Amino acid sequence: MSFLADLFFTTLATVKDVLPIVLIIFGFQFFVIKRPLPNIKKVVIGMFYVILGLSFFLIGLEEALFPLGRLMAQQLTDPEFIRAGLDSAVEVLQWSDYTWVYIFAAAIGFSTTIAEPSLIAVAIMANDVSGGSIGARGLRISVAIGVAIGITLGVFRIITGTPLHYYIIAGYIIVIIQTFYAPKLIIGLAYDSGGVTTSTVTVPLVAALGLGLASTIPGRNPLLDGFGLIAFASLFPIMSVMLYAQISAWRANKKSKNSAIQNEGGE
Amino acid sequence: MQLIRRILSPFLSSARDLLPIVIVVTFFQLFVLQQPFPNLEKIILGIIYVMIGMTLFIRGLEMGLFPVGESMAYAFAKKGSLFWLLLFSFLLGFGTTIAEPALIAVADEAATVAANGGMIVNDEAARKDYAYGLRITVAISVGFAILVGVIRILKGWPIHYLIAMGYLGVVIMTAFAPKEIIGIAYDSGGVTTSTITVPLVTALGVGLASSISGRNPMIDGFGLIAFASLTPMIFVMAYGMMI
């Protein structure tokens, strides 16, 4: 019974979020384009699936993963837990004492990104548009690796207390340089994959991690230093996707060269 | 047999997508924190819900959201009315962002930061005003980004010019913005792109790029989301400077 009530209220909330979009779409369709949507019945059923699916998704996350993940982030960042893992009793913790926090940051960044619905959407689209040459799975894994690296570095930043914008500006410079060398076809997609990684699944868990760290480390202000992890998580996938495309291009190039040499040898 | 496989296979692929999270959480709970799972049945049930939700969402994406975005892009391209297309682009960005729950949460936190930092009066009404202003700012910036991004697709400008300009804007604004707002501004770029906006906007971009001759959907179609996660950073820092 409580599940049905949950489902009802979550669906209601999702409908409220979607309402402006639906109004804009149908408003333009009827008053500007003035032609009914093709396959209107299928589209409406599809929209219904999207709303119901998101509601189930959110309820499941709230029931199972978020409470556990938040608790985990809290426990792992607790200074007591970190001291217990060290051999000697130390007063002041060094940045290198947070081993499990780094591993957790990377693991949770990777695994939540793989389950992120918006990334799945973009990956399906890229797969269709490129005629299968950009595989959905390869793209998602390289984005997830980017997020893992980004969040780990973001955690390092909170622990050491270095200014956020130095990292971000350095990241921008690397992205711009990479843009000159990356295959042209991937650039738009790589930039987009930065923005899509951080939504439904990743943000709540990552925010809990940032807040947990910023509130237990002396000298950090949770309201100032707790922010910024999401910015890392949306910058690093841009680099990792371009790198993935570069590596794929190099390998394809090498292969075709090799086979060309073999062909020549055969003649 | 075939029917069963057709129904089961999307569930299996959702299960595969969730497997990494399950492994990570289990490993940390049992081996690092060395604690048993609190109410295991509830967690398993929750994971089953997530799987059902993911499967439905992906099915609905292919049936509903992608076709809507693409067919509207074709219709606008055929109609040839620039004004309506641009208005639609702006409203799509604005309308999807203003109601975004993640943004509402960040805006409230930002208001607390501003009040503690002495930037605004520390009372309920002032905080509410500040948070509301911030949400409007971000929504306008996303609407603006989609609008400019659509113009880019029409003109065929390379995406990296826009992005490089956006980066430059962020760097310049960072130098002048109050310190308290920077973290929030940087994060607000990431939270604006919701699960429903992304498929619609991507389909719009790809649809436009494939219905205009001389544009390549792969090169010109993507990039709308990227620009829409940059402009909020610039606009939020500007908001922080003005108040």
Image (spheres, coloured by chain):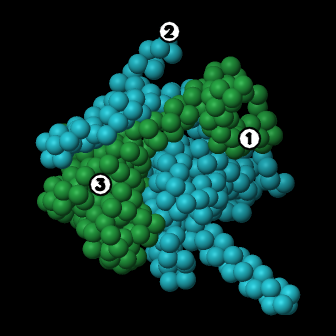
- Residue at label 2? A1
Q: Residue B23 has which mark?
A: 1
Residue A217 appears in the picture as rendered:
no
Residue B148 appears in the picture as rendered:
yes
Task: State the image coordinates of residue A201 (x, y, percent, origin top left).
Answer: 53, 42
Task: State the image coordinates of residue A196 (x, y, percent, origin top left).
Answer: 47, 54
Relative placement, left or right, of B210 versus B11 is left
Q: What chain does mark 3 sit on?
A: B
**Residue at image point 25% right, 52% down:** B75
Q: In this orientation, which residue lies closer to the viewer: B75 or A121?
A: B75
Vertical side of A173 occupied by A215: above or below: above
Task: State the image coordinates of residue A27 (x, y, percent, origin top left).
Answer: 18, 40
Mark 2 neighbour class, 10 Å CA radius: few under 14, some 14 to 19, many 20 or more: few
Give the distance between the C-alpha atoms of the residues marked 3 and 1, in whole angstroms.
44 Å
Helix, strand or loop at label 3? It is helix
User: Which sits earlier in the primary sequence, circle 3 or circle 1?
Assistant: 1
> Which amino acid lies under the numbered mark 2 shown in the image of this protein?
Met
Q: What chain does mark 2 sit on?
A: A
In the image, which is nearer the foreground, mark 3 or mark 1?
A: 3
> Which amino acid lies under the numbered mark 3 shown in the image of this protein?
Tyr
- Residue at label 3? B74
